[in-house]
Each structure stands twice: as C-alpha cells, then as structure tokens.
Amino acid sequence: MARFFIEYNMSNLPPTHQLSSNLTLPFKLVFPTAWLAFFGTITAYILFSEDGAYIIAGGLFSPDKLRIGSIIFMLLGFAMLYLFFIRLQRIDADTDFIYVNNYFRTRRYPYHNIEKITEHRYFLSKIGNIYLKEAGHFGKRIPFMISRRRYKEFLEARPDIAALRK
C-alpha cells in the first residue's frame, strides 16, 4: 500500500510562539477583499452602466466627474489598503528562528539575521517592523501587528532579541 504522507516526529521540534496579533488575518485578507468587492462593484456600476453615473450623481456632479472620482477613490483606497494592511505578516518564533508567514507561504530567518526591531503605535494597535540584515523573500522590512501579551512574554524570555528594539 502506498503512503500518501510522511510521518514526522513532532516531539523533536521546538514549539513556536505566535508574536503577531490574531487580527492580522482579518486585516490582511478579509477587510481588503470585502472593501475591494464592495467599492469595486459600485465603481464598475458607475463606469459601465449607462445610467449608473446619473443615478449616483443625483444631479450634484456631472457623470464624467463622478466616473473620474470613483477611479481615483478606488486607486487611493487600494494604495492605502496595501500600505497599511495587505503587507502585514504573521510572525512566529522558536528558540533559533523567526517564522514569517503571509498565509500562503512561510519563511524562516535565523535570529542573527535580524538587524533591529521597531514598534509604532497606531490608533488602538501596535505595528512592529523587523529589519533584516539581508533581504529575504518578504523583503528587508517585515511589518506585523503586535500581540502585546505574547510579544512581551517573548521579549522577557529572549533578552538578546529585546536588545534589538529601537
């Protein structure tokens, strides 16, 4: 009988600890997808329907200005989503490596490849950036949404990594 999977002895692997927030997944994938679907549908209606621009404009704007405005709104909205949400990564760590996950692929980087870690407070969340000495698959700067409790516990357990905070 053929074996369709490889058995691994999971007890030999060190446990990983998630450092990023559980909100990373909705902010990275769910919210941008919903936003683009909703406003993309409205923009398509305005652009491709003969009376769509007239109905939505309601006489306040000319349909051509509304079409141009909707395109600009979509481009600016997508740029903001990309800059603030889509680039977020999930970060896990074990004793020797950090694991960077974009929910499609995972890459691991050794701790000695970390140049510095920065933290910034935005509204109610904290965003961290891991800067690598050499660019990896996800680039030289890896943004992630910090889970305050797990991140604090990790830094207390790893003072060598805590020293890289700037």
Image: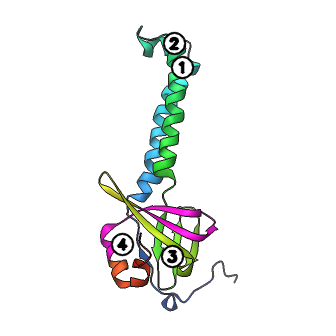
Range covered by the magenta-colored residues = 128-152
Asked if residue 35 is among those painted magenta in the image, a careful observer would answer no
Q: Which residue is mark 3?
A: 98
Corner quadrant of residue 15: bottom left
Residue at 57 percent across and 75 percent down: it is: 108
Q: Is residue 59 left or right of residue 9?
A: left
Q: Is residue 96 above or below residue 36?
A: below
Along the line of sight, which residue is nearer the eye, 1 or 43?
43
Q: Earlier in the sequence, mark 3 or mark 2?
A: 2
Please identify the residue farthest to the top as the structure is shown. Answer: 59
Q: Position of residue 118 (x, y in %)?
A: 43, 65
Residue at 48 percent across and 71 percent down: it is: 116
Q: Earlier in the sequence, mark 4 or mark 1?
A: 1
Residue at 59 percent across and 85 percent down: it is: 7
Q: Which residue is mark 2?
A: 63
Residue at 49 percent across and 10 percent down: it is: 62
Q: Earlier in the sequence, mark 1 or mark 3?
A: 1
Along the line of sight, which residue is nearer the eye, 58 or 148?
148
Kind of residue at disc 4: Tyr
Q: Which residue is mark 4?
A: 151
Instruction: Give the label on residue 67, or none.
Output: 1
Which quarter of the figure is the N terminus placed in? bottom right
Secondary element at tag 2: helix
Q: Earlier in the sequence, mark 2 or mark 4?
A: 2
Q: Position of residue 64 (x, y in %)?
A: 55, 13
Q: CA distance from mark 3 to mark 2?
A: 52 Å
Secondary element at tag 4: helix
* Figure disc tally: 4
Along the line of sight, which residue is nearer the eye, 46 or 119?
119
Q: CA distance from mark 2 to mark 1?
A: 6 Å
Please identify the residue farthest to the front as the structure is shown. Answer: 166
Asked if labels 3 and 1 touch by Cβ distance under 8 angstroms, the answer is no
